[in-house]
Image (cartoon, grey):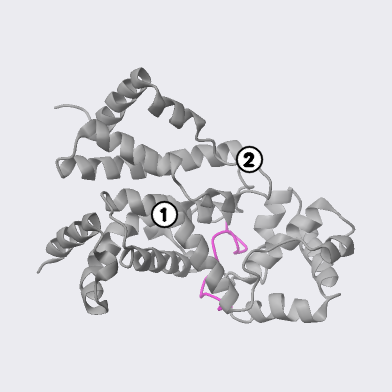
Amino acid sequence: MTRDDHEVRLRELARAGELGRLSEGERDLLRPAAYDLAHPVVFDAVYRRVAHHRGHHACARGFRHLGECCLDGFHDDLEAVVGSLLTTAEPIKDVEAWIAARAPGIAVDAYRRRRGAIGALQRPRMTKWLRAALGGDPWLCRLALRIQEWAGVPGGAGATLWPVDSWAGERGISTSEARADVEKVLVAMQERPKWYHEHIEIPLGHKVAPVGGCPGEGTGDPRPLPAADPGEQDEARVSDLAAVAVEAIRAGLGRGEDAAATVVRVLGELFLHGSGADEMSRAPGAATFGEERVSALLDDPVALEVLVERVLDIVRGPAG
């Protein structure tokens, strides 16, 4: 069987809800086709935002632009998504839409498991004792969370131990000031030596420095832009999901599915039934992406008819 044949077989088994009943050998035969389907969707639905959040804007341009600091993480996320797809027992009408809706949550769970495996906190949090040690300073408390998060990132050890350029840009201060603030936080953390050793030192020991650092870490590299505000993040998320939606709708039409039903299903899956993993790139308590507008459009028959027509015009492209 060719890889195209395996893709057809994968889709058939997914629609029937039979993937979870396959033997490991049967899954291995379908795995290359699953990777082919999941690869672009996982990048658009998950890793582009992760790269932006880390200040690796060059990596966010596309898979071929991923630096060594991000490539391993992307492959880890992709492997987790493919593994989940090939073991699910639920019927899947549209594989791409299913991946787009569930990949963020799958990636978050896999990321936390990888952090836990090296001793890092799965979900960095501000404890009462650490907040007190930092004098309740909002910036130092936020930086403490960044340090906890960074310590547990398996890769990413670049020219410097900490990504101070990115943190300096976030705060709008010089790199020397950022380094001084990092030292303040580390001193505060070391008030609990056992905690510091288990959750900071041990995870840091698992980092492997790449041949070249991540974008923006070199002396002559352009500095990463400051983190986007929530409005810009929402706009970027809509753009990412829209690109995934176009591909999922186009695939559904190619299989002869009803056009209007396909549009409604895909938009509902992507914009209304997501996992909430977009909160990864937000500060705790910050507002999440609002689905109210999409929900209102799908519930209004007149607006829905116009929406479907416009979406299909985009998917099908200009006539000619």
Q: For the stretch drawn in magenta, what is the main secondary structure?
A: loop
Residue 264 % position (x, y):
32, 34
Residue that appears at 81% across and 71% down: 189
Q: Is residue 285 magenta?
A: no
Residue 293 % position (x, y):
48, 28
Q: For the N terminus, which image quadrant? A: bottom left
Number of numbered markers = 2
Please give left or right for residue 185 compared with residue 74 in the image: right
- Give the numbered dot on residue 64: none
The one of 165 and 320 positioned closer to us in this rendering: 320
> Does any portion of residue 39 appear in the rendered image?
yes
Where 101 falls versus 199 (above or below)? Answer: above
Q: Does the magenta stretch include residue 216?
A: yes
Please give left or right for residue 206 compared with residue 162 in the image: left
Residue that appears at 50% across and 51% down: 49
Under mark 2, the amino acid is Ala
* Residue density around tag 1, few if under 14, some if 14–19, many if 20 or more, within 10 Å: many
Q: How far apart are marks 2 and 1 (CA)?
A: 21 Å
Using the rendered view, name the quadrant where residue 88 is placed: bottom left
Residue 284 % position (x, y):
68, 50
Residue tagged 2: 287
Residue tagged 1: 102
The magenta-colored residue range is 207-221
